[in-house]
Image (cartoon, grey):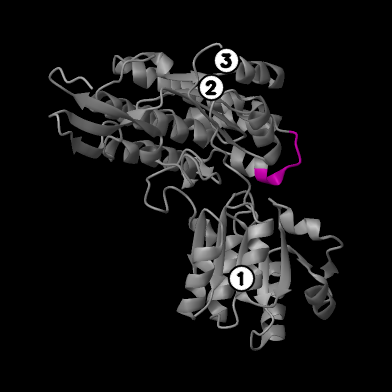
Amino acid sequence: MNTLLSIEKRNAVLLKMAKLLEEERKALININKEDLEAYNGDDISMFDRLKVDNSKVDEMIKAVTHLASQEDPVGVERFSFKHDNGMQVYNKTASFGTVLIIYESRPDVTVEAAGIAFKSGNKILLKGGKESLRSNLKIVELWHQALKEEDASTNWVEYLQFNRTETQAFLEKPTQKVDLIVPRGGERLIAFVKQHATCPVIISGRGNNFVYVHEAADLEIAVDVIMNGKSKISACNAVDKVLIDENLPNKEAFVKLLISKLQEFKIEVLGDKTIAETNGLESITSDEVWYEEFLDYKILIGEIASNQDTIAMINKYSGGHSSVIVTTNEAEAKTFMENVDTAAVYHNASTRFTDGGQLGLGGELAISTDKLHQRGPIGLQHLVTNKWYVHGSGQIR
């Protein structure tokens, strides 16, 4: 186990990393071009996440710089108690120890996840996808340089170059102690990790997010929220399903307008039986489609009878990530927000804000759709556990 570094040293490493990313910006972008050229898959969202350009490097620099400015999440007092016998009891946050993150295609995770883990006093094991290997190894090289220049051990950040078989073997019988695993990626990756892991796993689950246009919706807001929710198809906070209240005034005109706007952006619009029939769309042939996370230029619009029906529908089909009600009726919004079982619930705002940086956490390791140990974006202050500090002078029970 690595000895906890002082907060000054942890921050110095993060700032050094920001400097190195700036210095090596061109080299990193060029190495990433090799990964992009070698990628032969047809997954457009994977390709989008794989790409490192100037704005991506800016984001990486911003992430580590911001982390360096945040309060130390380790050793924060959560509870204190003075026992009758004079003992002083404290409960304080403590690092997990070693965190393994398994992720696909995103070199920026190699910066952000490692930064968050390191700042919260954890050793990080990075297992990236083969499609981003060159970019990831370059970033890890920079981490090691930053650590060395600040006289810290390079084993705080370790890259695991494992294939699927080796990964499975490591999950089942780790060759070093692992305290927490966070898989970030598609449902197949998550199922694979859950099946083989022998230590706690935080599930960064699927999106499949819903927008409910209530009968008292402001229609301009509804269009903006839906279009923005579909503006980045590779994101887990993208919108896939839209439910339109059957009592919405001017419903037909609104649906027509919405469909034409979506189609302008080359988004394929599917409909349930009612919406498809009245708008000449392809109708879904099975309710199974409501479960699907598209990660594609595709959206499904359906008609719904009420807020209660919407809540039941979202709780049945969504990925437990994010959901929105568009309405001017505060009471209906409250009912929706209290009863929809997703990590983030929105009233008149876009699901694209479910993101650690956007919700004030500075950055995120992943977005959890589990309820333990943290739900929603996992930020710096969530990558800790806690322990009890008890100070006595010889007390016995």
Q: Secondary structure at mark 3?
A: loop
Quickly name the residue at label 3: 174
Q: Which mark is residue 137?
A: 2
Q: CA distance from mark 3 to mark 1?
A: 45 Å
Magenta part of the protein: which range?
40-45
Mark positioned earlier in the residue sequence (1 or 2): 2
Q: Is residue 298 visible?
A: yes
Image coords of residue 35 (percent x, y): 64, 30
Quickly name the residue at label 1: 212
Q: Quadrant of the C terminus?
A: top left
- Residues packed near mark 3 inside 10 Å, few (<14), some (14 to 19) or many (20 plus): some
Residue 9 drawn above or below residue 219? above
- Residues packed near mark 1 inside 10 Å, few (<14), some (14 to 19) or many (20 plus): many
Mark positioned earlier in the residue sequence (3 or 1): 3
- In percent of the image, x 70 and y 22: which residue is there? 164
Residue 123 drawn above or below residue 379? above
Of badges 1 and 2, nearer the viewer stands 1
Amino acid type, mark 1: Tyr
Q: Secondary structure at mark 2?
A: helix
